[in-house]
Image: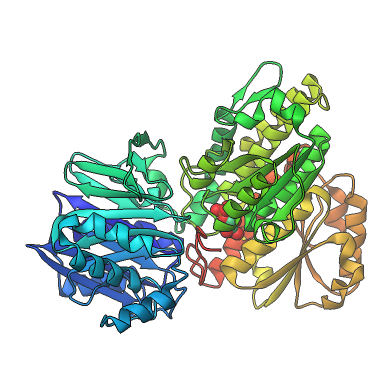
Amino acid sequence: MCGIVGYLGNQQAQGVLLDCLGRLEYRGYDSAGIATIDGGKLGMLRCAGKNADLQSLVDRSPLPGGIGIAHTRWATHGRPTDSNSHPHTDCNGALAIVHNGIIENYPELKEQMEDDGHRFVSQTDSEVIAHLIEANFTANIEGGLISAVRKALSLIQGTYALAVISQQEADKIVVARSGGPPLVIGHTDDGLYISSDIAAILHYTRDIQILEDNEIAEICRDGATISLLDGTPVDRARIQIDWQQNAAERNGYPHFMLKEIHEQPQAVLETIKGQTLLADGAVLFPQAAYTTTSQFCLTRRVTILACGSSWHAGLVGKHLIESISGTPVDVDIASEYRYRPQFSHAGTLAIGISQSGETADTLGALKTARNSGAGILAICNVNGSSMGREADGVIYTHAGPEIGVASTKTFTCQLTALVLFAISLGLANGNLSARAAKALLQDLLRLPLLIERILAQSEALAGLARLFDGATNALYLGRGVLFPLAIEGALKLKEISYIHAEAYPAGELKHGPIALIDRNIPIVVIATQGPLYEKLLTAIQEVKARDGAVLVMATDGDRKIGAIVEHVFYLPATTELLMPILMAVPLQLLAYHIAARRGCEIDQPRNLAKSVTVD
Ligand code: F6R
């Protein structure tokens, strides 16, 4: 999705901004641009393509000045072209804006502005903001830039994170936010930074103020003044972000995705350590009001709402919570749930799962659940994210920044958080004994070591990736708590290698997908030892009988599988309910190695965005 950065300080803004844009690349984008002010004169460069293309423009025509804004665009309204790239400017080229979000009433506003003589050069919804600010600035110059921005925003319907600079007030950046896309202000002795993504400015500062919904800020050399859009002053505390600086760098790995896959032992451990494990097996969640025993006793039902991989984590969560705590769980795709009729959710705890904490559909679904009487808990990775602030309580995963577009370590950390949640709920409602809770926690604490063992076999998975050479389709089969891992494995493959992959519960094979099987379609079967193991063997035999090329994910020491199938990857054994956390790792590595063999852009797959802030 689109990314915003801004800088105001002692350094030359162009260098800082281009560096920050590089750190936003992972979010996915198709064009980039930058504007600075020097000696009271605005300069701007923008182009379709990548940051490197913008860098070439800047090399040819440098943009001096200590104040500027920049943007990476992920096209929504209008194709990725030079003129649709941000920043956008007014008729006189005196002010520049960068915008994330969608202006829903832009056609009407544009028509009106054109009638008033404004000339538009793009097909975007965003350009109208520049013209609205210009019109209001000209009409009321005494009110200043911030007042013109306020007036312009009062006419807009839609969502925005916005940054504006103007020649007339060349010493400030005005930023505003409403309805979704995030915006943070970073402080250093050297200057102030703004960004739609903490990871982009983490290299410079961890001292952050978060701009909330319906707020506007004037950022000058001596600080940021935040107020509501209606002018009410806001006193916003600064928070310290504890992510490691180098967590947002590749550290010698060819791709962020591979680095992040290898960070999982530590990330899972940090997610466990981020909560308080008590001697009696209970788990305390430091920031989750909805996880007290008394609240748990009121919880009759859990509804999990999420998108993409986070939804897959929710599907595993259903097995975990139902098995461990005996509480019924519904899992819903957030973008579907929010548009269905709702019934009373009294006694329901709605859990939103989101690595970014900014996914518009999940935020919308949680609000819908709240309006029907549900309590809201968020499981997310980004401290201070919208979802964390929207929910009654939040369980933070401690994966650190995830830069690769395909989620890996945040997924395994979500599963870890769900295990902890299920244990806590089970102890509170009496479904789980203290002894069983302690045993499960001990098994959980062993997982980082077992993940290390799987990572040490990465080369074996690189070899198995050859099975996918020339494939255009693949099938993933699993059952029970591991079926969601089949879906997750298929999604990872689709996202980064562009091979079409589908996942089925293995029992469904004979009800239709078996028609697909021939020697050209690789089939990954998750067949670790568990209650449904024998049934999975039957599915494997059915595939083999039709010449399917099978790769089985099996448990260490399984002698039967080796006798039936040529290609097997063996994982260490653990409790059945914890196996999804281990299983995620070889499936991620397999997709990674397949994509690497095909020469794909692994960290920034085409068309994908890291944080989906539009619905
Ligand atoms: C897949 C992936 C996406 C996200 C989805 C939800 O690798 O990353 O499917 O899981 O867009 O994002 P979050 O978790 O930020 O709500």
Dividing the picture into quadrants, the one containing residue 396 is top right
Q: Is residue 220 left or right of residue 526?
A: left
Q: Is residue 103 above or below residue 423?
A: below
Residue 576, image x, y percentages = 80, 41
The residue drawn where x is 88% and y is 64% is 508
Residues 324 and 233: in front is 233
The foreground one among 292 and 286 is 292
Q: Quadrant of the C terminus?
A: bottom right
Instruction: Tell me where residue 146 appears, x and y as whole percent.
Output: 24, 55
User: Of 446 and 68, which appears nearest the observer?
Assistant: 68
Along the line of sight, which residue is nearer the eye, 139 or 446?
139
Can residue 569 be seen from the camera position used here? no
Quarter of the rendered structure image containing ligand 1 = bottom right
Measured along the vertical axis of the image, is residue 270 above or below residue 350?
above
**Colour scheme in use:** rainbow
Question: Is 596 displayed left or right of 449 in the figure?
Answer: left
Residue 123, percent across and down?
A: 39, 81
- Where is residue 498? Give x, y as percent: 60, 73
Q: Residue at x 59, y 54 (%)?
A: 364
Count of number-bearing discs: 0
Furthest toward the left, the residue is 39
Location of residue 166 (image quadrant): bottom left
Please tell me whether residue 546 is drawn above or below residue 148 in the rendered image. Answer: below
Q: Residue furthest front?
A: 139
Q: Is residue 394 visible?
A: yes
